[in-house]
Amino acid sequence: MDKLDVPKRLLLGPGPSPVPERVRHAMAKPLLGHMDSAFLTIVDNVQDKLRTVFGTQNPLTFPVSGTGSAGMETSLVNLTEPGDVVVVVEQGVFGQRLADAAGRLGAKVVSIKVPFGETCTLETLEHTLNEHSAVKLVAVVKAETSTGVLQPLNGWADRVHNRGALLLVDAVTALGGLPVEVDAMGLDVVFSGTQKCLAAPPGLAPMTVGRRALDRINRRKIPVSSWYFDLAAIGRYLGQARAYHHTAPISMFYALDEALSLIIEEGLEETWARHRAVASSLWAGLDAMGLKLMVPEEHRLPTVTTVQVPEGVDDGRLRAYLLDHYNIEIAGGLGPWAGKIWRIGVMGQGAQVSHMMTLIMALREALDDQGVSVPSGLSALQDSYRKRGRG
Amino acid sequence: MDKLDVPKRLLLGPGPSPVPERVRHAMAKPLLGHMDSAFLTIVDNVQDKLRTVFGTQNPLTFPVSGTGSAGMETSLVNLTEPGDVVVVVEQGVFGQRLADAAGRLGAKVVSIKVPFGETCTLETLEHTLNEHSAVKLVAVVKAETSTGVLQPLNGWADRVHNRGALLLVDAVTALGGLPVEVDAMGLDVVFSGTQKCLAAPPGLAPMTVGRRALDRINRRKIPVSSWYFDLAAIGRYLGQARAYHHTAPISMFYALDEALSLIIEEGLEETWARHRAVASSLWAGLDAMGLKLMVPEEHRLPTVTTVQVPEGVDDGRLRAYLLDHYNIEIAGGLGPWAGKIWRIGVMGQGAQVSHMMTLIMALREALDDQGVSVPSGLSALQDSYRKRGRG
């Protein structure tokens, strides 16, 4: 038999992020049954902690039994019926994915196509809503992992609700790393993943569903086409009835419970501030090396930084160098940006200045390996690390 | 903060089953990225080992990123198109679930309704196929967890294939615990779960898809309505292209890899034999106590035993007694058998004679607590344990 061989990587790509030992140990605890009151207490605790992290009072706040994209699918399959007009902001691969998934469910998808690296303005949203009557749903990615863009959503909920539509937000690369604030922002349905800023392994998709969305679901004319992702049935397991639906991934709940505890112990705002500070130190390091960041600072995501691959540098060879010599994982680009950018994650346990210092030094060596000279004096950079960083 | 409180249960319900320490430790290893070649090697190994356990050469043999029911949904959403005639054998709650899920996808469901505790005969299948033309799919549960019935499938594939239909089998409570033998039996699509006889935590749904089923999927007229469960896209991640689809639940793959290694180290036939022998020792114990088993031995599932709650015994109180005094979990009935039966699992790590002895002694005490006298001389029972058991 082969033995399970797991090299120790420093995961600085766009997820999964490194998982703290405390979380991995929690995950390894003995199994409980999914109807055991001891497990149901853990489910309740996870729901409470998720409400804190999402900034919501929504009773239906829970992790879907699948990875982040399962949260997307759960949102769409419950909120749309065939023929519904759904506006999707396509500003990157994950916006395109929302459009693809909604189309498969029979929705009439109206796409707002935004060039990679840019945001969608409130004016563009309003223009689209004016042009299309009877929009039922607007779907948008808050933190687009493929481009490194942070989409502002101020004023969106009002505009969307005024048309009688709902606002669905992909917060996969946002939750735990930057403000999401579901209730304050008036977001109707928000989904995320565990393997990004929450610092848990992939396997669950935290989501929250507000009252307006529940009303919409209760008024559906046809049953939800997915048995597995049917929110009404899942709600009966989570609620007073505790009616069996499917077997929850028990061990992943242990991991998520512990990961959420870590965030709440650190403080939610402190966690956001750490992500922001460590991202700034990364940006300073990349600047000092003369590398070009793809997104202007105003709309730059703290959790995933996109960097242009310099002229003459082989993307794959550089990433292999980082992996082989330093066990560091960063990612390449997706879609039109494949081969043109690197994506560096500053997420969860990975959001530590020491990791950014290691990465910058390794990156410099890897560029040097390809004959690309970068500024040799890094003292200014090191000063910036001392000033900005902690962790 | 509350600390994660996990009592140590002896899980003898119909799943999750107890997970060996080796498997839980493997799960706790550091994370790898889902595109890391070290992780892709683990994916390949898991696929190879699943082929052994399923008894198949099917290239598309892999774990779906969700619990067992996600395997059901993946099977149905890829194999059916709206309007397709689907024959479903409803011989228990999980057969009913197949019918429900197929109906939500727009299939015309033809149900073969079989009373709880009975099997569907080959004659009944033939009769149904004769009555309905253009059947596209026949779906049946091999091991019905709600009734404890083992459905024989000899001759089924030929009958189904002769009509141009495909055979879909739910092997959730079968895989690893009794022969499934996908290729030898001609089964087209089979799904399972990890938390039963495979002795891994819930969170993945192993499945295998044969050539006929792939041909059907390739000839679809409309896209698969589920983005998350789209087999064509999942196949591109598993295949040579290694095209990113969704982030796999990395840690669950570690657990499944280790759990499959344990089965292959023991030997697949030896594992089946152990489940069978331990089930026999359980049955002897229940018989000796005068309890009535719900299914005649001929069609009795070795992996889940269903037992009638004796007259005058309070089901909930008895199960609470086992949990409170012995930390033993068994389950009650589902659907029409709710409150009327107990379900005892003999699965994975739980399939040990010593556990059955503990259960029988605890059960006797719990019945005594309710004033129900059971035969006091248990020497015959103990002899039977000595003869049949190991473990």
Image (spheres, coloured by chain):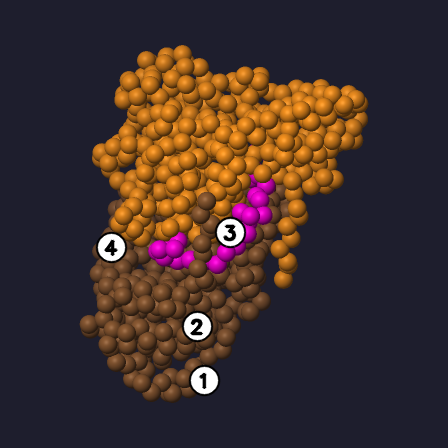
Chain colours: A brown, B orange
Which type of secondary structure does the marked residue at label 3 adopt?
A: helix
> Mark 4 falls within which chain?
A
Q: Is residue A377 above or below residue B255?
A: below
Earlier along the polypeptide chain: callout 4 or callout 1? 4
The residue closer to the viewer here, A33 or B275, is: B275
> Mark 1 falls within which chain?
A
Label placed on residue A303:
none
- Identify which residue is drawn at 46% across, 51% down: A4
Nearest to the eye among marks 2 and 4: give it.
2
Label placed on residue A387:
1
Nearest to the eye among marks 4 and 1: give it.
1
Amino acid beneath label 2: His
Going by the image, does B262 lie left or right of A334? right
Could you tell me how far apart the alpha carbons at marks 4 and 1 are, in whole angstroms?
43 Å
Contact? badges 1 and 3 (CB < 8 Å): no
Which quadrant of the figure has residue A162? bottom left
Which type of secondary structure does the marked residue at label 1 adopt?
A: helix
Q: Position of residue B99 (x, y in %)?
A: 41, 28
- Identify which residue is drawn at 58% across, 67% down: A265
The chief SS type of the magenta part is loop
Which quadrant of the figure has residue B316? top right
Q: Quadrant of the C terminus of chain B?
A: top right
